[in-house]
Amino acid sequence: MRQDGICNMVKRIDAHRTLERKDIALLEKLFDREFRQVSAGESLWREGENADSLVFLQAGWACSARYHKDGSRQLLEIFLPGDVLGLCRIALSDRRTDAVMLTDGWISELPYSSLLELFNESPNTAALLFAIANQRMAMLAERQIIMAHRSARERTAHFICECHTRLLETGATCREEFLLPLTQQDLADALGMSAVHVSRTFSHLAQEGLVYRNQFQLVILDSDRLKEMAAFDDRYLRIVWNDEMSLANADQAFREPPQALQGLLDEL
């Protein structure tokens, strides 16, 4: 169990750039800490709380969310095993969202103080985490575009393609069938529609021969047509990390997030 999350992180990065053994050792040193079991629905942090640590998802699915005055909820990010929660918001002093477990799982926590110590010790680690944070920012920007400019069918198709691609990268699935452990309400809150609309949309996709969904099991029946409907381009999921990335650049980026990201966080 301890290595599952690390393995998933390594596989995801390896899909874009091969890691050397020393890089893997640094990731293990960073995240293979004391971990605890968490339950579905358990809060990892709440909006407004002091932000002083990252959360590493060893196992299970989680999300970041905003709760509105009318009681509704908006899911902003979906986290899979091997993901780091809070990384692209490391420059903020307080939590801008809630973070909640969607399934049972295991997590470890990394205080910012320990993170900065390792940055000073290893510029490689700083550069790598900077690259992962950049990828997460790209996902947030892509999500904003999808939610604003796509139909319900297109949003749903894109969400399926994104989850499937991320799971393929870690080896969690190697075919067109995978586990999507989100309830009808979770999907509704992630896609910006009602639970009834989610049900209808999946029914339409099934009638068109694109997907089949049975509770938490999802099968992509025609991947090419589904991607075409979603206008899905996976380039925003790539982790770009090159040897020119330095500790100074990474540290500055973490402390001073780009204006575009700050604006995006304010809008979410």
Image (cartoon, rainbow, N blue to C red):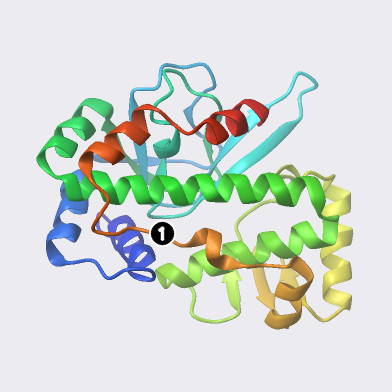
Task: Please give the name of the residue rendered at 78% of the width and 78% of the height, measured from the top-left corner.
Answer: 210
Say left or right for 55 vs 173.
Answer: left
Q: Quadrant of residue 200?
A: bottom right
Work out whether residue 30 or residue 203 is closer to the camera in this orientation and state it: 30
Residue 237, given in percent of the width and then of the height, sits at 51, 60
* Number of numbered markers: 1
- Quarter that holds the N terminus: bottom left
Residue 267, given in percent of the width and then of the height, sits at 67, 29
Whether 36 is drawn above or below 244: the answer is: above
Say left or right for 214 vs 181.
Answer: right
Task: Please give the name of the residue rendered at 67% of the width and 76% of the height, measured from the top-left corner.
Answer: 219
Residue 142, given in percent of the width and then of the height, sits at 63, 51
Q: Visible in this render: residue 207?
A: yes
Whether 252 is drawn above or below 225: the answer is: above
Task: Please give the name of the residue rendered at 66% of the width and 31% of the height, measured from the top-left corner.
Answer: 268
Q: Residue furthest front?
A: 244
Whether 98 is drawn above or below 105: the answer is: above
Q: Quadrant of residue 52?
A: top left
Task: Please give the name of the residue rendered at 51% of the width and 34% of the height, measured from the top-left corner.
Answer: 42
Q: Secondary structure at mark 1?
A: loop
Q: Visible in this render: residue 172?
A: no
Residue 232, given in percent of the width and then of the height, sits at 67, 67
The 10 Å Cα crowd at callout 1, few under 14, some 14 to 19, many 20 or more, is: many
Q: Amino acid at mark 1?
A: Ile
Residue carrying label 1: 239
Say left or right for 96 vs 23.
Answer: right
Whether 11 is drawn above or below 56: the answer is: below
Q: Quadrant of residue 230?
A: bottom right
